[in-house]
């Protein structure tokens, strides 16, 4: 088989797996795809992407993955519009600044930023959750200032790594804002979609976008993310939390081992 076709199939598989998980647990998928894009192609003999290129491809893929996943969740009444508003505006501003500013950073700084974010997310996922899982989701209350400030900070950091920040906004919602799991997952897709607009714009302006890998990942996202979202809506809430926690923890271990060794 032609090597170019194999290369495209590898990218499609990475995009499909990451986007399926993205839709299922309400993350943009970069928590999975960032290390997969970084490590799998060179392991199979293909040219390795730089951290800048991985971040750029991840950014545009997250845009389409979260858009598709958000539409799959929109009929369930789980997306909280106030939460999306108070976190969406600060995160898109921060993500644009981080996405564009990353052009001035070395690859090692981008990988380190990702590793720190993943470590924080992993710790937060294992903290006790106090949100009420049942009740009237339309009447949810949360600390608006804390939501906005945390979203702005996540936006800047996630813009740097092209991750759109969903893998850390979900733990923030669960632990700090006490948001029910299903509402956190569905709302995070909407917030991450908004964030990815700023991140993608910043990465394109920074000049690191690889359009063919990005197109392959986008196609995979459009197919896989809605499937994952449908599966996620039928799964046990605790199981969803543990899947997300396990994925984050595994990524943390791999990235930190590479940094330290």
Image (cartoon, rainbow, N blue to C red):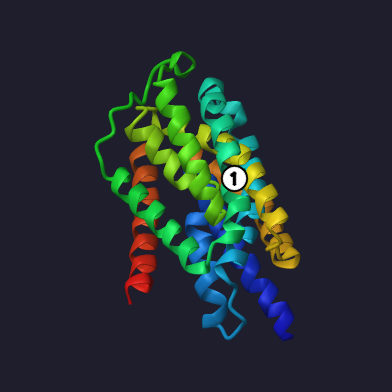
Q: Kindly tell me whether residue 68 is visible in this rendering.
A: no
- Looking at the rendered structure, the secondary structure element under dot 1 is helix
Q: Kindly tell me whether residue 37 is visible in this rendering.
A: yes
Side (left or right) of 204 relative to 153: right
Mark 1 crowd level (few <14, some 14–19, many ≥20, 10 Å Cα):
many
Which image quarter holds the N terminus? bottom right
Residue found at x 48% / y 35%: 151
**Image quarter for residue 130?**
top left
Residue found at x 62% / y 40%: 193
Q: x and y percent of residue 8 in the render?
A: 69, 72
Residue found at x 69% / y 66%: 213
The front one of 30 and 154 is 154
The front one of 9 and 41 is 41
Q: x and y percent of residue 124 in the render?
A: 31, 43
Side (left or right) of 139 relative to 239: right
Q: x and y percent of residue 20 in the render?
A: 55, 53
Q: Residue furthest front?
A: 104
- Using the image, determine if residue 176 lies above or below residue 199: above
Q: x and y percent of residue 248 in the render?
A: 38, 55
Residue wearing tag 1: 97
Which image quarter holds the C terminus? bottom left
Residue found at x 52% / y 68%: 107
The front one of 55 and 103 is 103
């Amino acid at each position: 088989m032609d090597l170019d076709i194999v290369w495209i199939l590898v990218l499609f598989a990475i995009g499909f797996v990451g986007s399926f998980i993205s839709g299922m647990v309400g993350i943009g998928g970069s928590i999975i795809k960032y290390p997969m894009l970084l490590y799998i192609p060179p392991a199979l003999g293909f040219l390795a992407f730089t951290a800048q290129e991985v971040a750029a491809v991840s950014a545009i893929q997250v845009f389409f993955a979260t858009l598709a996943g958000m539409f799959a969740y929109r009929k369930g009444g789980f997306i909280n519009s106030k939460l999306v508003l108070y976190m969406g505006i600060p995160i898109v501003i921060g993500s644009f600044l981080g996405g564009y500013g990353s052009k001035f950073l070395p690859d090692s700084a981008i990988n380190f930023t990702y590793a720190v974010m993943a470590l924080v997310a992993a710790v937060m996922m294992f903290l006790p959750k106090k949100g009420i899982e049942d009740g009237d989701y339309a009447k949810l209350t949360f600390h608006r200032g804390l939501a906005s400030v945390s979203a702005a900070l996540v936006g800047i950091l996630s813009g740097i790594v092209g991750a759109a920040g969903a893998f850390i906004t979900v733990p923030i919602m669960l632990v700090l804002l006490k948001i029910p799991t299903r509402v956190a997952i569905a709302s995070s897709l909407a917030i991450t979609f908004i964030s990815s607009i700023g991140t993608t714009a910043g990465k394109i302006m920074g000049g690191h976008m690889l359009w063919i890998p990005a197109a392959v990942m986008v196609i995979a996202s459009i197919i896989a993310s809605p499937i994952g979202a449908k599966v996620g809506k039928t799964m046990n809430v605790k199981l969803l939390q543990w899947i997300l926690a396990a994925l984050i923890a595994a990524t943390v271990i791999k990235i930190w081992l590479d940094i330290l060794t």
